[in-house]
Structures are given as structure tokens and as C-alpha cells.
Image: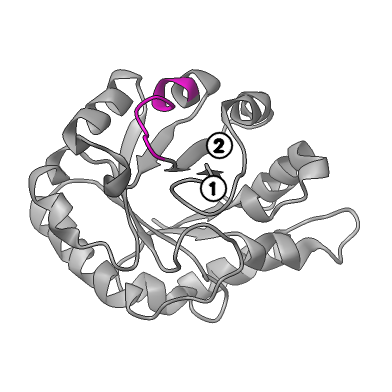
Amino acid sequence: MYRIAPSILSANFAKLGEEITNVIDSGADIIHFDVMDNHYVPNLTIGPLVCEAIRPLTTAMIDVHLMVEPVDRIVPDFAKAGANIISFHPEASGHIDRTIGLIKEHDCLAGLVFNPATPLHYLDHVLDKLDLILIMSVNPGFGGQKFIPEALNKLKAVRKRIDESGRNIMLEIDGGVKVDNIAEIARAGADTFVAGSAIYHAGKDSDPHRYDTIVSALRAELDKV
């Protein structure tokens, strides 16, 4: 099962509710919610109040990617705001196992995020507690970056670990995902695809903004895998 997760980082924030409704109505599965703090990453985006505001607009899962440090303080706020999945970077947590436990205590699925140069050894002792693993195929902090090909090797390595564990863990990719590379990414093992500019920028010429064409194109490429 493949899941398409548009990142609202690339949406029109003046019409955010409409953008979210339209992209889900166009066939997307998950809303990816990028949180940046101008500390762990060099950008500042949105917080729990925005998550709370969009929660009533959709029954789709809200996938919160925390690019913040420290991370534990903000986890309960996003859980209360309606997040379904909360993912964090191991570098941003003093105690990774504790942060995973905190996320689960607040009835959310827990994810661990790996930057392009972050080693996978963090999985050695927590794989059995994770619901999602997110591989960054760009360096975090900005949208619209080009896909880093080495991410394919990291995906293959993580897919092998997941399959050997026998657990049902989502394997997500984020960064530079588009129509002409999504099939190759899926072959490397990903099952959940974050796409920001590839989806939202494709809808800018439509009136009203609809995303059926680009979402259908992404799914057509996945059907070839």
C-alpha cells in the first residue's frame, strides 16, 4: 500500500484550509506537517495552533515532522492539537527511547527521522517501538530542494531491517519526490511519499486549485512498481 503525503510547507498559507481540503479530495492520503524552529534547522514555520485549526477539516492522518530541539517539550502540545503521527530527529532528543515513549503515551504513532548524513545505528535499540521511519532525501529546513540519490541506498537498508523485524512500520521519504523519480524511490523500499512543491506548485495554474492531475500522475508511476 502506497501513501501520498503532501507537505503543507509548500501550500498557500493564505488559503490553508482550502488547500488541505482540496489535496485530500484529490486523492492524497496523509497531511504532512513540517515544524521548524529556526534552531535545529534554519527556518521557522508553524506550531500546534495551526495543527489544531486544521484538525476539524479532515479525517486524514496528520503526520507531524518535528524539526525542533529540544523535542520533548512540544510533543504533548501537538498530540493535544490532533496529530496522529509525531516524528523527530535523534539528534534533537537527549533520550531517544524516552521521546518515543512520550509520543506513545499521548496516543500518537512514533517516528524517527534520518537526515542524509545521520547513521542508521539509532535503530539498533528502538526499531521494535517505532511505527514510522522517515528518510530525508534533502537536508531539512527548506522546501523545493533536489533529491539526494544516496537516500535510495539508505531506504534499501532500512527496508531490509523492517522486513527482517516482521513489524508493520511505515517507511517514509521526504525531499525532492516527484513524478519522474517516485517509482525508483518505491523500488528502493519506500511506501509513504512526502511531496510538497511537486504537488502544490502543480496546482497553481488551476482555478480553483485542484490536485487531481498531479496526484493521479504520482499514483500512475507507483502502479508501475
Labels 1 & 2 near each other (Cβ < 8 A): yes
Q: Residues within 10 Å of mark 2 (few under 14, many from 20)?
A: some
Tell me what residue is drawn at x 57 percent, y 76 percent. 179
Judge from the rendering whether residue 81 lies leftward or rightward of residue 106; answer left or right: right
On the image, numbered disc 1 is attached to which residue? 29
Q: Amino acid at mark 2?
A: Ala
Q: Is residue 151 magenta?
A: no
How crowded pointer 1 is (Cα within 10 Å; few <14, some 14-19, many 20+) is rated as many
Percent across and percent down for residue 110 are 31, 36
Q: Main SS type for the magenta part?
A: loop
The structure residue drawn at horizontal position 57% and vertical position 27%, both measured from the top left corner, is 48
The answer to whether residue 224 is visible is: no
The three-letter amino acid code for the residue at tag 1 is: Asp
Q: Which residues are magenta?
A: 69-77
Query: Is residue 99 left or right of 200 when viewed as pictured?
Result: left
Q: Which residue is mark 2?
A: 60
